Image (cartoon, rainbow, N blue to C red):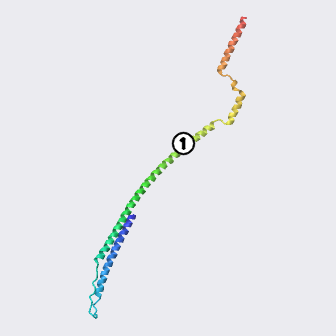
Amino acid sequence: MVIKVYERRVNLLVETRAEVYLKSLVHATTMADTAVASQAPRPGLFGTKPAPAPTFDASEVQSDLNSLSTRLRVGEERYSDLRRKLAFIEQQSLAGQKKILSEFKHMTSEQTELKRSMVELQNRMVLLIKELQLMAKKSDVDVLRKYLDLWEPVKFVNADQVERMIKEALEYHERTTGREGQD
């Protein structure tokens, strides 16, 4: 878009300068022709002098055309330089845009993963809290300790010990009753 505007400006500038120059040349030649034609020979003291011929300097026109063509070439070079720079800027812009887009996608995926991790962590915390609520409190443990101290379960016997005690008592009873009958 910028290149097209610049191209139009350069074309208009070249066209207008060429037209102005050609118009001035045409105007100068017509003015010279009309000035020569309007001057009638005046009788003078020594007669009439011939009117000076209009001068049309081809080398001046050629130099003006050369300067115009040089200016046109410079304008075209500037235009092509601007076009190359604009193409380079567009390429850099596209590359930057792609890089930013890929970074944005990466950040989005990281954000999604972080959210998932946070939800998993929250679920574990809820589970841990529920398990802690199911555990006995210190006051409950203290009550159990008091009862254990009161009952002294260390002095309790287990089933094997009771069976052994019964067997020993029966054996003792049989031995003692068996001796009395023998005496």
Whole-percent x and y of residue 60?
A: 30, 76
The residue beneath circle 1 is 120
Q: Residue at x 35, y 73 (%)?
A: 17
Q: Is residue 10 left or right of residue 52?
A: right
Quarter of the image with the N terminus in it:
bottom left
Query: Which quadrant of the figure has residue 126?
Result: top right
The secondary element bearing badge 1 is classed as: helix
Q: Residue at x 68, y 15 (%)?
A: 168
Q: Residue at x 31, y 72 (%)?
A: 66
Badge 1: residue crowd in 10 Å (few <14, some 14–19, many ≥20)? few
Quarter of the image with the C terminus in it:
top right
Q: Residue at x 29, y 74 (%)?
A: 62
Q: Is residue 75 left or right of residue 124?
A: left
Whole-percent x and y of residue 125?
A: 58, 41
Residue closest to the eye, 119 or 25? 25
In the image, residue 116 sits, relative to residue 96, either above or below, namely above
Query: Which quadrant of the figure has residue 51?
Result: bottom left
Amino acid type indicated by mark 1 = Glu
Q: Is residue 108 left or right of residue 153?
A: left
Query: Which quadrant of the figure has residue 182?
Result: top right
Residue closest to the eye, 57 or 110? 57
Whole-percent x and y of residue 142?
A: 70, 34
Q: Residue furthest bottom?
A: 45
